[in-house]
Image: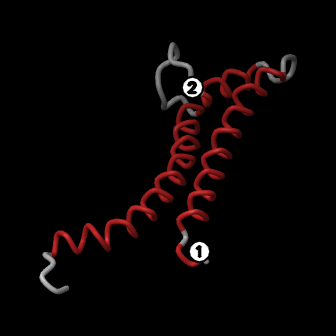
Amino acid sequence: MAGVGPVRAAVAHVVPGAAQQVLVAATLGLGESVVALSGLSFLGLGAQPPTAEWGSMLSAGRETFAYAPWQLVGPGLGLLLAVTAATLVSDALRDVTDPGRRP
C-alpha cells in the first residue's frame, strides 16, 4: 500500500470489481421488477385504470379471451420481450465483465 490512502485504494481496487457485479445484478433485477409490477397490476393492485400497464391489459383481455384472444397477444408479447431483453443484456454484461474469461 506504500503511502496510498484507504479511499484511493478502495476506489482503485474495490469499486471496479463491485461495480461490475452491481451492474449485472441491477439488470437482472429490472426483469424481475417488470414481472412483479405486471403481476400486481394484473391483480388490480397496480396503477389505476387510466395508466396503461401490461398486467392490467392482460387482466382486461382475460374477460374477452373467448371471442377476441388477440387482445392478449400485444401485452403478453411486450412483457415477454421486455423481460427477455433485460435477461439477455444482463447475460451479455456478465460475459463482458467476467474477469475469468479474459485472455
Relative height, residue 2 to residue 62 (above, below) = below
Viewer-closest of 52 and 25: 25
Circles 2, 1 touching at the beta carbon (< 8 Å):
no
Residue at x 52%, y 46% (from the top left corner): 30
Amino acid type assigned to the residue bearing label 2 in the image: Glu
Quarter occupied by the C terminus: bottom right
Please state the horizontal and vertical placement of residue 23, each as a whole percent of the image: 45, 56
Residue at x 61%, y 50% (from the top left corner): 89
Q: Is residue 34 left or right of residue 8?
A: right
| Applied colour scheme | secondary structure
SS of the residue at dot 2? loop
Q: Which residue is mark 1?
A: 102
Residue at x 84%, y 23% (from the top left corner): 69
Q: Which residue is mark 2?
A: 53
Relative height, residue 9 to residue 40 (above, below) = below
Q: Quadrant of residue 98?
A: bottom right
SS of the residue at dot 1? loop
Q: Quadrant of residue 7?
A: bottom left
Q: Quadrant of residue 41?
A: top right
